[in-house]
Amino acid sequence: MSAAIFKAYDIRGLVGDEITPEFTFATGAAFARFLKAEREPGTVVIGEDMRPSSPELADAFSAGVTSQGLDVFRIGLASTDMLYFAAGKLNLPGAMFTASHNPAAYNGIKMCLSGARPIGKESGLLTIEKFVNEGSPIPLSQVGVERRKEMLDDYVTHLLNLVSLTSIRPLKIVIDAGNGMAGHTAPAVFARLNAEVIEMYYELDGTFPNHEANPIDPENLRDLQAAVKKHKADIGLAFDGDADRCFLVDEKGELVNPSALTGLIATRELAKYPGSTIIYNLISSKSVREVVEENGGTSVRSRVGHSYIKKLMAETGAVFGGEHSGHFYFRDFWRADSGMLAALHAIAALGESDVRLSQLLAPFNRYISSGEINSTVSDAAASTKKIEEHYGALAGVELDHLDGLTVNGESWWFNLRASNTEPLLRLNVEATTAREMESIRDSVLNTIRA
């Protein structure tokens, strides 16, 4: 087994070479051992995405869990947020078979504790990896029982109880499911809404024949942008492979900045829960903090990554958290992320107003951002140090190291972070004007790529 498949927040690798039924059986048994040590409930919820390898791998994992005397609920085809819903609603630990937006050759496992509490390297994944390497003895106790459980209708009902959509104006919505799990969940959700839906790539196909199910790459949104303009739609939605992330396209076919959606949802949650705390990650637009404070909330800045966001939400009692990568977290959804719930908030806000989406979001688009730019470097630490020495010597500049290096100027800021898995530096720049953003961006890139 390659240790590289145990990532920061999940397990992910190549099917056949790294992820095999033998491996997932061993991981299921190890997960069960870990849950016993944590005094968790004795039943595990298992969901799976549409990848061809998912059913066989999930079968083996379930056999591993039950070999240790724990029971299993199989909920079948599911989005990752549907698995989180099941773990939260039933208060059981869970495992989701998916490789999210990765290509068809990959698969993986996302695991959580009861109540959809996250498991990452710092909260159990290292122990599970250790148990996999040790091998789990077959106990003398009785083998557990596997049962099937249908959760889709309950999932839809819960989402629609969190966002009121009964009085919205009729909308035309284009949804690009990317041949991923939104093709399974979106029909059940949108059948209950006052909306005309134009479906794109709803066929569940883990080979992703139309484009990668990774909406953070603008190339994968071109078909959706064209369809929104062609159909004169009010809004376009794009989901990733396991549908836990959602990206928007406005009525002009323009991509919506995820920070603008964070700001919009924050205002809605603060209207519902006045004075609450909102979490945002440190590559989000400065406008998010401004919007939260203007609406009477408390903003808390987080490192990038769902385990950090969820931990801060638990510690602060935050009602909502947003990441610039398109992950949105809700206290009323067990602090888990849900692309569908974020989409419903956007649709509700649009349907309750009499303006177009671009106008609705205009107050949240206050600055010019570069988007994330990756640079391959031989020594990330040395390259970062060069940038820190240069900018740290400038007057009126502040530095912080919450996550990588963040440099704050009077009318601009940028963050430089090393990838955990690749020899890359990730740069995000924001400024008041496009000219200033481009100047800072080019200066940093020229230095680290020299």
Image: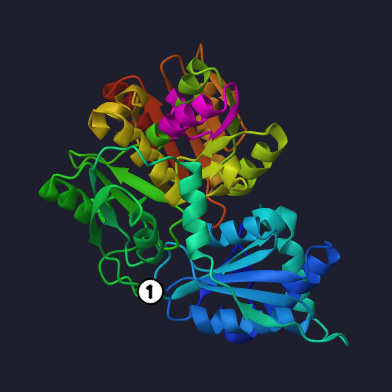
Vertical order, 90 against 311 (above or below): below
Question: Residue at point 52% right, 18% down?
Answer: 293
Q: Is residue 192 left or right of residue 121?
A: left
For residue 33, above or below residue 315: below
Q: Which residue is outermost to the right?
A: 140
**Residue 41 in view (yes/no):** yes
Left of 350 or right of it: where is 391?
A: right
Q: Is residue 281 magenta?
A: yes
Image position, residue 234 (x, y; %): 22, 41
Q: Residue furthest top?
A: 395
Residue labelled with disc 1: 206
- In magenta, the rendered stretch is 262-287
| Image quadrant where one finds the C terminus | top left
x and y percent of residue 97 in the render? 54, 71
132 left or right of 214 in image: right
Instruction: State the count of labels.
Output: 1
Task: Estimate how packed mark 1 is, as few (under 14), some (14 to 19) or many (20 or more) residues with alpha carbons within 10 Å.
Answer: many
Decide which of 318, 435 is in the foreground and name it: 318
Q: In the figure, residue 445 lies in which quadrant?
A: top left
Q: Residue furthest front?
A: 166
Which percent across, then down, holds residue 132?
73, 76
Q: Residue at x 50, y 43 (%)?
A: 162
Q: Is residue 191 magenta?
A: no
The amino acid sitting under disc 1 is Gly
Indicate whether 32 appears above or below 326: below
Q: Quadrant of residue 40?
A: bottom right
Residue 447 visible (yes or no): no
Where residue 141 sits: x, y (%)?
87, 85
